[in-house]
Image: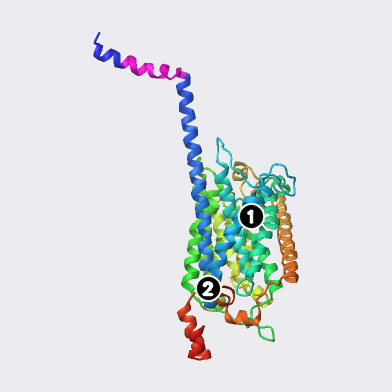
Amino acid sequence: MDNHRFWPKVLLWSIPLQLGLTPTGVFAAEETTVSSVSAGLDALWVMVSAILVLLMQAGFVLLETGSTRMKNAGHIAGKTIFTVGMCSLVFWFAGYGLIFGAGGNAFVGWGDFLFQPQSADTLPPSVFFLFQLAFAAVSLSIAWGGFAERAKLSAYVLFTLLFTLLVYPVVAHWIWGGGWLSEHGKQDFAGSTVVHLTGAMAALAATLLLKPRIGKYNRDGSPNEIQGHNQVYTTLGVFLLWIGWFGFNAGSTLAVGDGFFGYVAFNTQLATGAGALVAMAASWIWYTKADIPNLLNGTLAGLVAITASCAFVEPWAAVVIGAIGGFLVVVSSRVIERMQIDDPISAISVHGVAGIWGTLSNGLFATPKLAESVGVGQGGFFYTGSFEQLWVQCYGVVSAGCYAFAVSFIILYLMKKAIGLRVTEEQEILGLDLSEHGSYGYPEQIRAEHQKLFGKEQGASV
């Protein structure tokens, strides 16, 4: 026998025995390795998705800043940073536990306060926490649309605390945390109701209590257009939101698995494109111009509308859902403006109206196969001939929307009586950059404007 060939083979086959592994143990080790790699990929995907959703805050900064006036630009950018920071701490302290705490009931979760991540064989709790936190912060940023250009900085601070404790967690628990709507089979894959409608109802409560901005309406009730100062900012903001939305929707699969996240992303892209094109066409017909704000709002409306149904519908239905969302936002923003509701960034139309439509669309277009694979509810009317899922979607939207509006309104009303919500008329005219922060977002341009209005000496001192 050739010793040079024999002993290497013996040593090779003896390695499993040296490690205490039988052939069965070798296969078990391989299975464990595959399982670990799969869990690691899932964790990495959800972490990347959480970062994408957090990146959406940069989109909100540009969108809200560009849609409002130059004198408030620094204020809008700065308050986004501190409210997201404050939201993070409040969500860690209690918000997460009120959604997912195991000791709760059908109305609210209870437990996991001062959240402490534990080790897990599947998705690490710390990663899941960060993903859910990013969603809560998005809902909060949507609410700020109703505050824009007229709210005190102190109102942002206090409402961040109370919204993250009393409003968002309750709705999220009902649908995502095992609450009563979850038990009834309400379909809301990535949050058309939980995130978008909740934030929009808070924005509606705020704008009703704050009243319109100075100069928005004439004495006869007719509206004046208060143009945003930078359409390039708004467009960049929408693009950042669009990119971040792939973390929002596709990330909600919480797994790499069989690649279903790609299907969700595919539906998201189709709906967004349809919303943009239909909104542009509607604005062209209505205004005889391809109005850029309507185009951008239609794009966002397509994203919002498909958020609930991206995992439940076929691609053709995603196109229909996004297209209808794009049309609705053009019509609803005009109607809301004529109702003397001053919504500077169209949060109520984009996130509220489109969020309602997107949630209801599941009751029409959800396929039985996808509903079964996702494990929520059943097929919609066009596949089953039954109104059961549509009915669940209807009372889910009504109950969640009414709760978010009522609690937000009560909170803001009490705040208005206790500390006031709105800056003074003089502060609003001067701009929140200077009146609330003591500096301007665009110091050179603003000083030039003051020099024209008040003279060189006073302008220079400002």
Reply yes or no: does residue 14 show up in magenta.
yes
Q: Residue at x 50, y 58 (%)?
A: 55
Viewer-nearest of labels 2 and 1?
Answer: 1
Reply yes or no: does residue 342 show up in magenta.
no
Magenta-tinted stretch: 9-23
How far is disc 2 from disc 1 in space, using C-alphas? 26 Å
Can residue 264 be seen here? no
Q: Residue furthest bottom?
A: 455
Q: Is residue 353 left or right of residue 445?
A: right
| Amino acid at the residue labelled 1 | Val
Q: Which residue is mark 1?
A: 90
Q: Residue at x 57, y 58 (%)?
A: 85
Q: Which one is in front, 52 or 332?
A: 52
Task: State whether the magenta stretch is mostly helix, strand or loop.
Answer: helix
Q: Residue at x 66, y 85 (%)?
A: 218
Q: Is residue 244 above or below residue 369?
A: below
| Amino acid at the residue labelled 2 | Ala
Q: Position of residue 333 (x, y in %)?
A: 62, 72
Q: Which one is in front, 301 or 455?
A: 455
